[in-house]
Amino acid sequence: MMASLLTIKHWKGKFAKVAGINPDYSYGRNNMAGRI
Amino acid sequence: MIFSSLLFADLPVFMKQAHAAGLTEGTKLVFPAAGWQHTLMKKEFTPEGMLFGHNTLYFANPKNSATAREFVAWYGEKFKDYPEWEADRAYFAVESYKQAIEKAMKAKNGSWPSQNDVIEAMVGLEVESLGGKGGWRKDKIADQTFVQGFTTHKNKYDFVTLAEPFDTMYSANLQKPPGANFWEWIKTAKFNI
C-alpha cells in the first residue's frame, strides 16, 4: 500500500505502462490487483 | 514502470539480469519488499532512484533508537552484514510477548497468566520496536512503522541505501480497519501523502 501511495506521490502522470512481477509466494498474491 | 513484490533470492538475481539486459535504464522501479535482500542489492546492478521498501527496519535510519543502533552495530560485528526487517519482526514479537506477560501478571497480582490472559493483554499494547513504534489492534492485527524511499549510491557501502529524505508511515494509516473488507474499503479510503 505504501509503495502504491508513494508511486502516486512522486510519479503521478509520469508513467504510461505498469508491468507487475509478483511470484506466487504466500505473500504477493493479489498484490498487483490491490495496487493497480 | 515495473512494480514487483520480489523479495527472496530471486530479487538480486532478477536485478542483475535486468541490468544486464538494459531493462533498468529509463524504467521506474517500485520494489516494496526489496529491503529483505538489501545488502545483496549491489550498486553495480541496482540503479539510483528506485523506490525501495525496507519494511519495518532500515538499518541506516538516522532516527533509529539507541537500542536499534546497538543492535545494528552488534549484528555487523557478529555477522559482517547489516540486518533487515526480519530482525525487527522477531524483536517486536518477543517484546510484545514480554510486555503482555508483565501486564497480565500485574492484573493477576503476580500469578503466571494463562494463554488467554496473555492474548487479551496484547490487545491495545504499544511497543517500541527496533524499527520504531508498533502496536496491537483489537482484532489482534499488528500495526508497525514502515520505511520506503529512493535508492542512492552515495554511501560507504557496496549496496544501495535510501536517499534522504525518505518516507516513514505508520500502518494504522495504511491498512484496512478491523472487520472491513479490503476491496470495499479501498474504494473510498483516504490517505495522507
Image (cartoon, coloured by chain):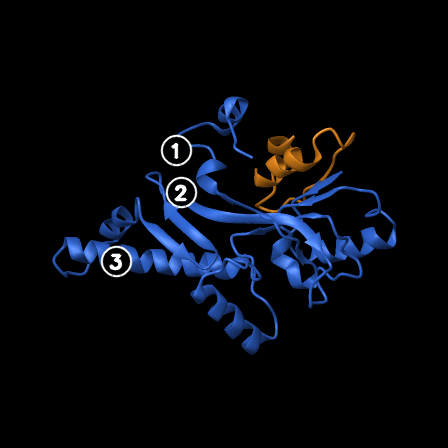
Instruction: For mark 1, give the secondary structure.
Output: loop
Q: Is residue B159 left or right of residue B144?
A: right
> In the rendered view, would you say A36 is above or below B126?
above
Q: Earlier in the sequence, mark 2 or mark 1?
A: 2
Residue B141 got which mark?
2
Tag 2 and tag 1, C-beta contact below 8 Å:
yes
Q: What's the chain of the residue with tag 2?
A: B
Point 43% across, 61% down: residue: B91
Q: Amino acid at mark 2?
A: Ile
Q: Amino acid at mark 1?
A: Pro
Q: Is residue A8 left or right of residue B44?
A: left
The CA distance from mark 3 to mark 2 is 18 Å
Quadrant housing residue A33: top right
* Image hue for chain B: blue
* Image hue for chain A: orange
- The residue carrying mark 3 is B101
Q: Quadrant of the C terminus of chain A?
A: top right
The CA distance from mark 3 to mark 1 is 24 Å
Rendered location of residue B56, percent (x, y): 51, 52
Q: What's the chain of the residue with tag 1?
A: B
Q: Are marks 3 and 2 on the same chain?
A: yes
Instruction: For mark 2, give the secondary structure.
Output: loop
- The residue carrying mark 1 is B178
Point 73% across, 28% down: residue: A13
Rendered location of residue A31, percent (x, y): 61, 37
Q: Earlier in the sequence, mark 3 or mark 1?
A: 3
Rendered location of residue B187, percent (x, y): 54, 22
